Image (cartoon, rainbow, N blue to C red):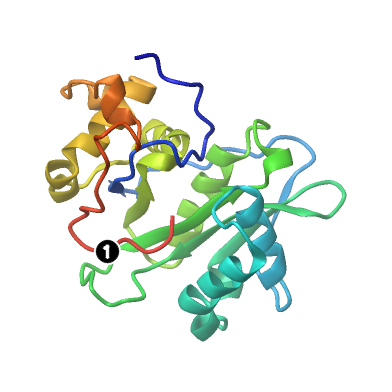
Amino acid sequence: MALPAFDNHDSRIAFYELMLQADITGMAEIPLPAGYAYAFYQDGDRDAWIEIEKSAKEFSSYDDGLNAWQRFYADHTAELPRRMVFVVNEAGEKVATATAYYDIRGVDQSGDGWLHWVAVRRDAQGKGLSKPLISHAVQVMKGLGYTHAKIPTQTTTWLAVKVYLDLGFRPIEKNFIRCRDGWRIVKRLTNHPALAELPPARDEEVLKDSGHAGASAAPDPTPGK
């Protein structure tokens, strides 16, 4: 079976929740490409956030995005001006976002920061924004006092997982064990050297509808991206 060419956010891939972590004390900031700048959240930016996430295929509709906003951010808007970051283009448009957050459920008692909802608008993808954005969000975390960060993500956003691995994040041990087949999918799609110890998934295991459906088997439910 030959695999199709996958999008960077592709529902054809068997779904597994994945969790990464890293000590961020030594992580350096990567500069943005020319013509782009950062801006923190301001009142009224909710719809810009929804539009970016919707364009990146995190949501299928505005209402889906609004529901996510209500779940993750509506009760925490006072914190967003120092936690939610946007990338702004030369026209002043917000084209990418990430949030230097924490586990709002209170399940994670480690005190670690959580990187949430990293997304680049569709027409701004491929312009070298992802790694600078993530590295900047890490600097924001450090400024807030965090020394360690976690990232919840999933196999269906496999290219984002590759970026996290490139930046030095690694699978959380419990998640690596419980979602081993998910990490094998990432190995098959990226051949990332950080996963050298894993055998790659077989092609039929990668595809959601091939009889090898994925599982939501993270050590804890993982909110957001």
Residue at the image point whose x is 21% and y is 72% from the top: 109
Whether residue 45 can be seen here:
yes
Can you tell which quarter of the image residue 156 is in? top left
Nearer to us in this view, 37 or 18 = 18
Q: Position of residue 130 (x, y in %)?
A: 56, 40
* Residue 100 vs residue 19, the one in the foreground: 19
What residue appears at the point 51 percent right and 22 percent down from the top-left corner?
5
Q: Nearer the viewer, residue 161 or 43?
A: 161
Return the residue found at the far right.
91
Please tell me which residue lies in front, 109 or 225: 225
Left or right placement of residue 117 versus residue 94 in this view:
left
Would you say residue 40 is visible in this rendering?
no
Image location of residue 96, percent across then percent down: 65, 51
Q: Is residue 42 above or below residue 37?
A: below
To which residue does mark 1 refer?
221
Q: Amino acid at mark 1?
A: Pro
| Quadrant assignment for the C terminus | bottom left
Residue 180 coordinates in the image, percent (x, y) = 17, 37
| Secondary element at tag 1 | loop
Tag count: 1
Q: Give the image location of residue 7, x and y in percent.
A: 54, 32
User: Residue at position x 47%, y 62% from top?
Assistant: 100
- Please, is residue 166 above or below residue 203 in the view? below
Residue at left offset 19%, top offset 43%: 179
